[in-house]
Image (tube, rainbow, N blue to C red):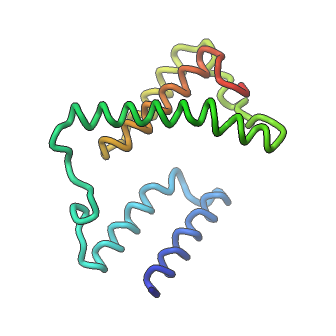
Amino acid sequence: MAAVLLELVIVSGLFVADASGLVPFSTTPFLLVLGWISLRLRKVGWRDVGFVRPRNWPRALAIGAAVGIGMELLALFVTEPLIARLAGKHPDLSDFRPLVGNPTLLIVALVAIANGRTLAVPIVAHGAANTLAFLLIYLDRYPGV
């Protein structure tokens, strides 16, 4: 129990540091190291918690793409409009305005989200959702841009 509380304090501190601008680029590597340490202390491996290579890559990629598109559609047509209605305004997406009509920047954004991903299904889902979002921003169809 003490280990779980310590991990929660460390993760909370990491996110506070990130919000304060103290984390150099991303919390992901730090969370990965924390996860690895946590597993080692418990004498459990990555495989024991479900991180294994898929037996059928095309199926895993198809599931990831379908889930990613479904997540983006849910966010775009249900979650975000609901939050905007409750908050009384749309999120500020003005930072993405340069993507509108800029194919070079669109390609850079798509390459950026494609790099460094190694967990097949969740990453393909995340990539598909981001790709759809970037394409909607590029086409000037994303709500709030």
Q: Where is residue 13 in the image (x, y as percent from the top left)?
A: 59, 70
Residue 142 in which image quadrant: top right
Which residue shows up at 68% across the image and 23% down it? 97
**Which quarter shows the C terminus?**
top right
Q: Considering only vertical position in the picture, is 7 above or below 80?
A: below
Which residue shows up at 53% across the image and 20% down it? 135
How many numbered marks have been drawn onto this rendered protein structure? 0
Residue 44 in which image quadrant: bottom left
- Between 93 and 142, which is closer to the camera in this rendering? 142
Q: Considering only vertical position in the picture, is 40 above or below 134?
A: below
Which residue shows up at 55% across the image and 76% down it? 9
Residue 81 in which image quadrant: top right
**Which quarter shows the N terminus?**
bottom left
Which residue shows up at 73% across the image and 37% down it? 91
138 with respect to 47 (left or right): right
Q: Position of residue 71 (x, y in %)?
A: 50, 37
108 with respect to 84 (left or right): left
- Between 23 and 128, which is closer to the camera in this rendering? 128
Farthest-out residue, bottom:
2
- Between 73 and 61, which is closer to the camera in this rendering? 73
Q: Considering only vertical position in the picture, is 109 above or below 141?
A: below
71 with respect to 81 (left or right): left
Q: Position of residue 96 (x, y in %)?
A: 65, 28
4 with respect to 141 (left or right): left
Q: Position of residue 51 (x, y in %)?
A: 26, 56
Farthest-out residue, right:
88
